Image (cartoon, coloured by chain):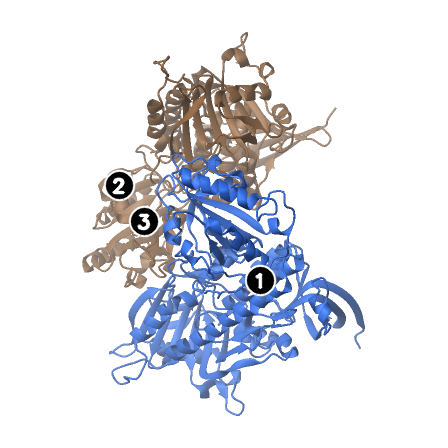
Chain colours: A brown, B blue
Amino acid sequence: MPTSLVKESDVDVLVIGAGPAGLMCANGLAKAGIKVRIVDQRYVLFVCVTDPGGFHLAIDACRPGDLLAGRADGLQPRTLEVLQSYGLAERVFKEANQMHMAAFYNPSPNGGIELTDRAPDVTAPTARYPFECTLHQGAIEAIFHDSMRSMGVQVDRPTMPESIQISQDADVLKDPEAYPVRVVLKHLRTADGEIDTEVVHAKFVVGADGAHSWVRKSLGIQMEGEQTDYVWGVVDLVPDTDFPDIRNRCAIHSNNGSCMIIPREGDKVRLYIQLGRTDAVDSTNGKVDTSKTSPHKLMEVAKTSLQPFYIRNTGDIDWWTIYIVGQRVASKFSVNNRVFIAGDACHTHSPKAGQGMNASMNDTHNLVWKLTYVIRGWADLSLLDTYEFERRKYAQDLINFDKKFSALFSGKPRTQEYQDGVSHEEFKKAFQTFGGFTSGIGIRYAESLITNCKYQGYASNLNIGRRMPPQILLRAADSRPVELQDLLPSDTRFKFLLFTGDISSPLQQGKLSELSQRLGRPGGLLDPTLVGSRRSMLEVLTIGVGSKWTVRYTDIPPLFRSHWSKVLIDDSDPHERSGGKAYTSFGINPSGAIVIVRPDGYVGMVAPFTAVDDIEQYFDSFAAKP
Amino acid sequence: MPTSLVKESDVDVLVIGAGPAGLMCANGLAKAGIKVRIVDQRYVLFVCVTDPGGFHLAIDACRPGDLLAGRADGLQPRTLEVLQSYGLAERVFKEANQMHMAAFYNPSPNGGIELTDRAPDVTAPTARYPFECTLHQGAIEAIFHDSMRSMGVQVDRPTMPESIQISQDADVLKDPEAYPVRVVLKHLRTADGEIDTEVVHAKFVVGADGAHSWVRKSLGIQMEGEQTDYVWGVVDLVPDTDFPDIRNRCAIHSNNGSCMIIPREGDKVRLYIQLGRTDAVDSTNGKVDTSKTSPHKLMEVAKTSLQPFYIRNTGDIDWWTIYIVGQRVASKFSVNNRVFIAGDACHTHSPKAGQGMNASMNDTHNLVWKLTYVIRGWADLSLLDTYEFERRKYAQDLINFDKKFSALFSGKPRTQEYQDGVSHEEFKKAFQTFGGFTSGIGIRYAESLITNCKYQGYASNLNIGRRMPPQILLRAADSRPVELQDLLPSDTRFKFLLFTGDISSPLQQGKLSELSQRLGRPGGLLDPTLVGSRRSMLEVLTIGVGSKWTVRYTDIPPLFRSHWSKVLIDDSDPHERSGGKAYTSFGINPSGAIVIVRPDGYVGMVAPFTAVDDIEQYFDSFAAKP
């Protein structure tokens, strides 16, 4: 009988589950210098995709239902921007496939299918990366593992949580220094089969433990919503085919059922294949029964649906699964602002629009800086209310979108014989209308203590609550074009963007000088003698209107240029290849404006120079007094 | 007394000298799988730039005169393209400073200097990277060291060559398998001061051992040209200044002498300061005498020249030197096509236009693939004649340019009082006129067996003999925009660019089909059954005219698409952000054209579809028979 050792430990944040949501959380916290641990019950990271027997292992290693979550669909444009903000996108671009084009196939009058239309895969005009990346989840997780390892954090696995208790003492719950959550963990030492027991005392716990979340169930949080009738099979393969759109994302409506093609890294392709309920569901309990089908059977369906084109797999099937689409959202995302759930633990839906991993990572991206601020003593616990407020609303929107889109995708195509079917025009319109949403670019957080819409007019084309869009600016000192988003890294700081208006205008210079005095006054937001949180949470970037041929960065008041590289102008680069469109794109008032960008890259506030009080109040509403 | 051991070894190529020229050579050969060794006599790589006493060490570690070569000036646009072709540019971009703007200062009527004008630092419209990078030479060398290490090659140091002998036997010299060069090396084991002697038998030797080249002297090769009267001092520092152009390249003509500012990585800046001969030259022998000056004295000159702006060094002077400009070219670059000299061993000139390191690296970039072809048995020894033919002509052009430019730079400025001085207009015009040359972009190799200008008209805007310019193309299969230059890596292969014309035109399809039959015939250039050199030295890329909304990459004959990613179209990307300009930019004939790009990225030949014989003859002229 295995011996059992009990040790006790404490940690600022315990993350349960090391999928994309958990890794984004732990990596972000580690980067912010927060004491974080992350545990996962899975034995294996992911099966090697070139291992011919791999899919069996994957099925064995995961509990039923984890499979869908187990292999992610792709990285949306906004997720790529977020990864870039953590310095992680570069490697994604090296390893991933890019989808730039979507192709739509429908029944041909001659039988089989034919190309009806193509359209850009992403409909989001301001996307910095106007495409999706596809890469197997193991590779994406490896990027996080390497980043975390460089900061001394590794996933503890296999580790099972056994119990979770939150203190009922109101004073303890209110004390940001307290450790009110007690979690018992069982570490399996695989080599000898022994189990170590550990009691962890945490300030905060994040349950990112998937669709069957143990954390969610332990806290008694309900999933609201229902299962659909749609059953789909998924196959990953390296095809031999004469299908000309095999490297584009394809939505195929055939009379044999619908099919989606997602090209992946290398020459790999993922097929989503619509199945009849009887082909894959156990009628006695309504659950998926994998024994009723096989990758071979899935391929047979795909072959028929793709006619007159041929498709064969050239080797072994990398991975396959079947699933029933469920559309549910958790009733709440947090208990006492001490335990949070994120990712698939909060929302399940169809993978057809490739939202799963993206929604998950963006959940914890939203949470990381807020936890950091509270743990550092920079903000009140109430800041954490905005996590559920912002992300649950998004999850509900996601389910609503998914209902519409799944119905259109799984519906029969409209043909001469079947006039009630889904027409191409209808489908394409939905595909493009939802583009802002599916790309993640259009997501807008509603007004709250961190999203202040009072002065929207001063940057009329910048939507407060949306992410700060990309824009090429020129560094005033050296005329080097730089991407604004690269100046907004996820470093937990608010960015104070000072749009000065025309630097050479004496009127604007006067206003700037006045603003410098006001913000720099003793106790002011940018008081240079101030030490502590308020100064550390802000970075000032100055963006002027000026000509690269004459501008002098030294003309900007010193308070607004901590370094020569922090002064930018809205002008084209010396070769006129890019730049010069920021003021117009953002709709900046010629008299200047201040834009506050939240640490997660979302616009938190816009204000005129005269609204220093409002800006200071914005920070006072959630941040600790200096 | 140290013991002496003698060992014997053989190697395909022995590179003597591990500066930029030697490293580019050894790295390129290693990448090509050639057995290469590289030795250097320097003890230290480079002094740490943050080491306050570093400049003393640098002076001690190098022989007099090496100083100039010891610290390179910058990477020109063409060099950046070349580094990119070896996969080495990415790290340069991470570590280097970029210079986008040049500023010109002249005497102000009020005393001191004033800004006269600014202009793009690079004048070369087709440059992929329209700027220069500055980075200390140690960091650049480290990039090569890391790349070489990943291939199992390291610099042997400190190692002194002692003697070099080339076989006088004509048969041996003609035998590509022979090792006709015998070099005796002395390896100093620094730990115990012992010396190991080694006799190396090499097929080829490359002397990249600097301005005072031992290889060159051993072979009795003369330097032709003369020393000038221009004496300059150089200081690296992190300045405290109110000079608004401190992060731009500045050409300053003051009444106190000329000065050039080169911003470098981090906040570092290099100043080039014109000196009087008496300040720095030993009148008895005409040589530089460093004891006559000091970094403090150099800074005093700079402070006066920059008035009314102030400049102070904030810490220690990183590095400094003084030098007299010499302008010389070696009488020949090779002996028997068995020993070559490259880099500063072949040409010395002023550093003012930042050509030194660039000319050096491009020398060996030119040589690497030619040596590789001969060593692999793919080409006759006579291919090596083109090295001196192409690079000596370039070196002469460089000296001629340098004479003109140095005179303008070192000349007194034209003022009210001194009407014979150099006017700003004159200087700026020269700066821009020479832009194609100084950027490296405009360099054109003259007609030779590897540069065939017969059919120039079929790609009227592509200069045969110039490097293949960048251009965004779309991959037909997935509409992904790709940079043509990224498809032309320095992998020792010729690139066969098949510009098909309109893919959808039956006329062009017929021509393509005919061309496929002709090139694919038994014994034809692209005969798919062929095994060996001729097939291995060619990669086919197909570039069609077509629309991304309708194109089918499967319409291209299989001979011209070895993989789906090798078919490209000249169309804009799905978001109309780039692409669609290749045919126009290159002036491709609507009936199609074949462009042969050499392994070093230079256009070697253009031909119509009907000129298959000429294309095959082009390869027959230097390549081994299949």
Q: Quadrant of residue A448 in the image?
A: top left
**Badge 3 sits on which subunit?**
A
Q: Amino acid at mark 2?
A: Asn
Closer to the camera, B79 or B225?
A: B225
Report whether mark 1 lies on the same chain as mark 3. no
| Residues at marks 1 and 3 touching, judged by CB atoms closer than 8 Å | no
**Residue B454 falls left or right of residue A298:** left
**Residue B154 falls left or right of residue B547:** right
**Badge 1 sits on which subunit?**
B
Front disc: 1 or 3: 1
Residue B523 lies, in percent from the top left, at: 61, 47
Q: Residue at x 53, y 58 (%)?
A: B600
Secondary structure under tag 2 reads loop
Q: Which mark is residue B24?
A: 1
- Residue occupied by mark 2: A461
Residue A557 lies, in percent from the top left, at: 29, 60
Q: Is residue A529 above or below residue B328?
A: above
Q: Which mark is residue A497?
A: 3
Q: Calculate the distance from the C-alpha at mark 2 to the C-alpha at mark 3.
A: 15 Å
Closer to the camera, A546 or B483?
A: B483
